Amino acid sequence: MPRTFILTFIIVLPIVWLVAPLWGRADEARTRLPASPALTQAYMGSLCRPPDDFEILFENQGLLPALESSAEGRRVGQIRHVYLDVLRRDPVDGDCAALRDWVEDRTDIEQIRRRISGSYEARRVTQVRQAFIDALGRDPVGWDNSSLRRWVDSGFTPSEIRGQLAVQRPIVGVHYFTWYQNRESGWGNNRDVVQAGMKPAIGWYSSSNPIVIETQLAQMSAAGFDFVIVHVNAESPEAWVNAHTFFDRLVRYKLRAAIILDGLYTRPATQKATWVAKANAEFAGHPNYFFRDGKPLIMLYSATPDFAIPGVALRNVYWTENYGPGTNSFNASPVLYPRDWPFWAPTPPPVVNGVVPVIPGYVDTHLGRERSMEYPRANGRMYREQWQRALALRPEVILVYSWNEYFEETAIEPTEAWGDQYLKSTACYIAHAHRGTTGTC
């Protein structure tokens, strides 16, 4: 057992002994000592159970990690991996009761694997996997578990699934940033300044300007985008205000939009859960909010969703050198979870859980990072190659990075440097995606 957990137990045990008589019966104790929503969500996301009275009383950021590395936490992780390997789903997402039954049953992990492998659900996964291979010419296992499970959970027969996949049309989203402002040091965010050669066609703008947002929304809508991913730095009050301004203007368009929370990275699960709950409360009720699987989509940028919020479709959007199963450098356990979405990738981009990322180019050699990367636009060639690959894979979603991320030189909105070249080609490729066709633009 970890030393921190032992020390915590030694320190608090006398306190528990002193206050225990005041608690009364266990049911009454739970009534008087309710867990905070964030703590409950963190426990459900990690251990598939709510915290007990001891864990509620001594709520702190160090207790949950200690429990995750305990015998219970390790067993939960082992069983989750069996589900991912065999059924291609994570039981933490809606099936905690079954997972906890296995945890308490104490059955050997290999026996659990054999029993799950012999289930009707496992046979259904095998049938749908073959339907994917027949219809799309690619194996979804490992890479595209989310899409595989979507059809496993449907009421369609394998033959009907093959037919549906054959006519599948991807929807297209684009990443949008709300952090630009004019300052004495230059145009940029609170930390960095954009290079002078990357000036937008509409000039150096403020992300809080409703007229600028209106112009950008009109351009995105005309290009045919289905939805926008609005990046919000969780700890920046200005970013939240700008996002609200964006959504206020969005009502004039058919476009949908969803929030991605940036800057949370290695924050404790309880903090991340609190921020997601805030985004859900403030934006999900908007008539133009984007839903996935019947739930409002809320994304985290490079922050593991190790918590559970009922009624929210959580996704973790991140960059890694290799998104492939078993080689994913982002996750501590090299597993591609169904919640994982790709941020960007060099050519050829992969399909990850139904999503293919598309990028016009990427350059960060000027940012002074420890490791820099450079993938030149080559006058639009990289963008063309990425789009043609995305269309050939026939995914559920294509995500363009980005509308206006100038620091890594991935923007496609009109600029003085390239005019509306990328806007026109984007409209052409989105039309291909909606028609289910391929071709050049």
Image: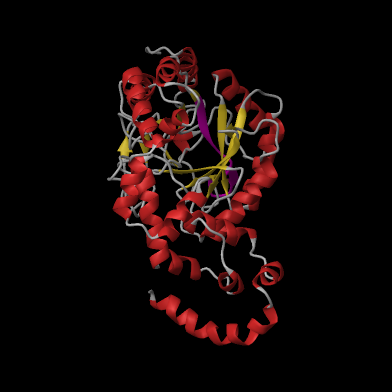
In this rendering, is residue 275 above or below 340? Answer: below
Q: Residue at x 48, y 58 (%)?
A: 47
Answer yes or no: is residue 69 visible.
no
Tell me, yes or no, whether the highlighted magenta stretch contains residue 389: no
Magenta residues, dominant SS class? strand
Does residue 53 appear to the left or right of 376 in the view shown?
A: right
Q: Position of residue 243 (x, y in %)?
A: 64, 41
Is residue 168 in view from this perspective?
A: yes
Position of residue 25 in the picture relative to residue 380 (left or right): right
Q: Residue at x 64, y 34 (%)?
A: 289
Residue 183 lies in the magenta-colored region: yes
Quadrant of the image containing the N terminus: bottom left
Q: Which residues are magenta?
A: 172-186
Q: Position of residue 111 (x, y in %)?
A: 31, 51
x, y percentage for residue 364? 37, 43
Q: Is residue 408 left or right of residue 205?
A: left
Q: Pick whichever, 292 or 350, lies toward us.
A: 292
Considering depth in this image, is 146 or 197 the residue closer to the camera? 146
